Image (cartoon, rainbow, N blue to C red):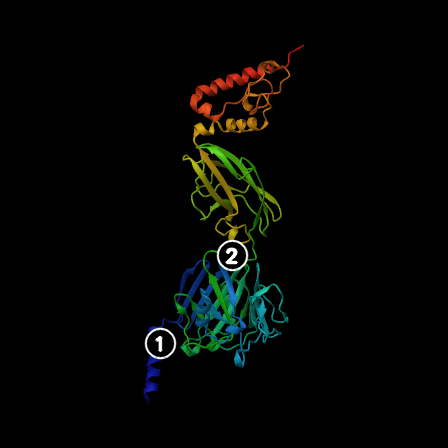
Amino acid sequence: MSNASIAMLLGVLLSSVWRPSAAWSEDTWADPFPGVRWLHRQTGDQNVNVLVVNLCYAGVSVRATDSSERGQTVPDFAVAVGAQAAVNANFFFDGFAPDGLVVHEAVPWPDGADDERNTPVSFGTYRAEIAHQNLTTAFEPWMREVVSGQTLLLWEGAVAAAPGAGYDYRTAVGLTRDQELILAAVDGPEAGWTGMDFDGLVALMQEMGAYVAVNMDGGGSTQMWVQGYGVVNDQAERYRAVASHLAVYARGIGLTPHCTTIYAAELVAAGGGFSGMSMTLVAGSIVSGWLELRNAGTVAWEPGRTNLGTTVPQDHACVFATGSWIGPSRPATIDRVVAPGETGRFEFEIASPASPGVYTEHFNLVEEDVAWFSNSGGPPDDTLRIEVTSVPPSEGSVEEAVEGESAQEETAPEGSEADGTPGDAGDMTDPGADLSDGAVGGTCGCRLLPSRDIAAGGWGACIVLLAVLLACRRKNRPAVR
């Protein structure tokens, strides 16, 4: 017996000794990236890897291969484009000509086209779908990233593949009804595993929750790469260059371009104390107001789930928080169920910080445990802004007085005290005088003291001011006849 034969025999014996029995299986789940779960399943004769990708998780998107990038291994392609994970995609011919449609950044490959043998897997803005195999799908403008497989496995939850395919390496792609992308890689006989036929592949995709699923290129082309782990499936060939690939980005922050559930809002109005979204308040004082926003997304907002939260950065404790807030980073929840296209209101209070200064806080809507609106349909996190200038109590108490002095200086008639010339004493007793708060009191001669006078006289000056105003109003009250 040759040395090679002996080595092969030893390999088979060791495999049978060290592998678990066919009845034994182990599932290991991991969360390698935000929005991505990874299943590694090993039985006595199967080695399976599955990625479950949440297309609605912040920063999750996909990328197909550009025509100029064809002919790379999966790890080479994934590293080159900075992906977090990738699998092989289309069947292909000589020269890496693809069997089926391939599109990157809305540009289709010149030598790729769909027919009734192929099944396109397409991703666009707020859209992800797998077409039926029996249809001939032409490129459409909404398609941003497309790869194609053959043999439809599942269609709308029902088994679509005919039985009878042999056991082999398998790569499969599926979509769930909950907007998850399923990527599966099953190892085959060349690496010492059984592999799967279509029946087994259908069962696997059903177990993972796929609603539609398709078989991609398999055999020596099957490769699944995960950043930080390399190619995670067993390959007899290390590694085959393939025509096209499907890469996944999962960075934990950013837009969700392929999520068909859109959380988006548009500011309609601000009211109460928030009318200008910028205000001057006495330190420690509290003002209440509201923000009205239109639901510009595709999902209804619900109290307790759709909340207003702090941003820049997201979820930080806010300096304006009061005891009426849901939490330090959550001012309020939506006031009612708000269907797409309708307008809802967030009512809350803000407290002026105790230390004088100018404070700016940013807010956005968040669907709790699902998505920030800035990562779905908007607005950006720096759009909704409230600015508070916090002033000391003594300065804040004369805010209206300062405004009144400015109004007096701009509107006082000639000969008034504000004009710097002596006023007409006779005017002070004019019963028809019109007293306007904050300005010269007609010909009454009463006016609000400037801030410097109050600052010098303290609270006593304020009391005198109040008494003068009351006396002036009584003097100008029309006589009863």
Label 2, label 1: how many angstroms apart (C-alpha)?
Answer: 48 Å
Looking at the rendering, in which quadrant would you find the C terminus? Answer: top right
Residue at 43% across / 40% down in the picture?
Answer: 319
Residue that lies at the very extreme toward the front in this rendered image: 421
Kind of element beneath mark 2: loop
Location of residue 294 in the rendering, given as x and y in whole percent from the top left corner: 59, 46
In the image: residue 455, left or right of residue 117? left
* Residue 188 horizontal/vertical position (percent): 44, 76
The residue under label 1 is which amino acid type? Ser
State whether residue 448 is above or below residue 479: below
Residue at the far top in the pictured view: 481
- Choose top left, top right, bottom left or bottom right for residue 158: bottom right
Query: Which numbered marker is on residue 255?
Result: 2
- Could you tell me residue 371's position as x and y percent? 50, 52
Near mark 1 (Cα within 10 A), the count class, few <14, some 14-19 or many ≥20, is few
Which of pointers 2 and 1 indicates the residue nearer the eye? Answer: 2
> Which percent across, then down, holds residue 383?
53, 47
Q: Is residue 158 visible?
A: no
**Residue 280 seen:** yes
* Nearer-N-terminus badge (2/1): 1
Quadrant containing the N terminus in the rendered view = bottom left
Three-letter amino acid code of the residue under disc 2: Leu
The residue that mark 1 highlights is 16
Above or below, comparing residue 126 to residue 221 in the picture: above
Q: Residue furthest bottom?
A: 1
For the point 60% across and 71% down, which residue is it? 133
The reply, left or right, for residue 8 in relation to residue 106 is left
